[in-house]
Image (spheres, rainbow, N blue to C red):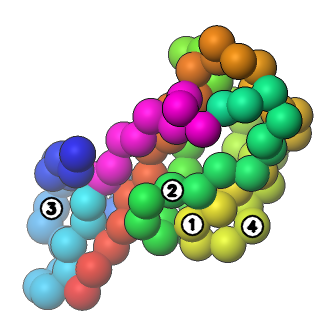
Amino acid sequence: MAIANAFNTHGGTTPEPSGSSITIYFEDKTNLINGERVRFATDNAFDTGSLVVWLNGIKQRASEISIVDATNFDLPSAPLSGDVLEVRYSTTTS
């Protein structure tokens, strides 16, 4: 489910330029964990630099996440069955 973003792309609260809109997505990818998979996909193409990944509630370092393309990312190792994987990212439309 998308929520409205209270902040603009620069971290402030002034409106974005006319005609652009940012949507933030939170997705639970836990059901995709199988103990072998390291590549996961988001439901939408994400803005560069906006992907944040949590594994078992611990934010993963951006330097540890390999961005494959605008919808796919790789983890350094496969999460185990029973782990929880969640992501947050934004998309900008104009």
User: Which numbered disc, 3 or 4, marks the residue closer to the eye?
Assistant: 4
* Tag 1 near tag 3, CB within 8 Å: no
Q: Is residue 2 left or right of residue 50?
A: left
Q: Nearer the viewer, residue 91 or 33?
A: 33
User: Quick one: SS at disc 2?
Assistant: loop
User: Quick one: SS at disc 1?
Assistant: loop
Q: Is residue 76 left or right of residue 48?
A: right
Q: Nearer the viewer, residue 11 or 52?
A: 52
* Tag 3 near tag 4, CB within 8 Å: no
Residue positioned 65% across, 50% down in the render: 40
The residue wearing badge 1 is 71
The residue wearing badge 3 is 14
Rendering quarter of residue 69: bottom right
Alpha carbons under labels 1 and 3: distance apart: 28 Å
Q: Is residue 88 magenta?
A: no
The residues colored magenta run: 24-32
Q: Which mark is residue 42?
A: 2
The residue wearing badge 4 is 68
Q: Which mark is residue 86?
A: none
**In this view, 79 is above or below 2:** above
Q: Is residue 10 left or right of residue 18?
A: right
Alpha carbons under labels 2 and 4: distance apart: 11 Å
**In this view, 1 is above or below 54:** below
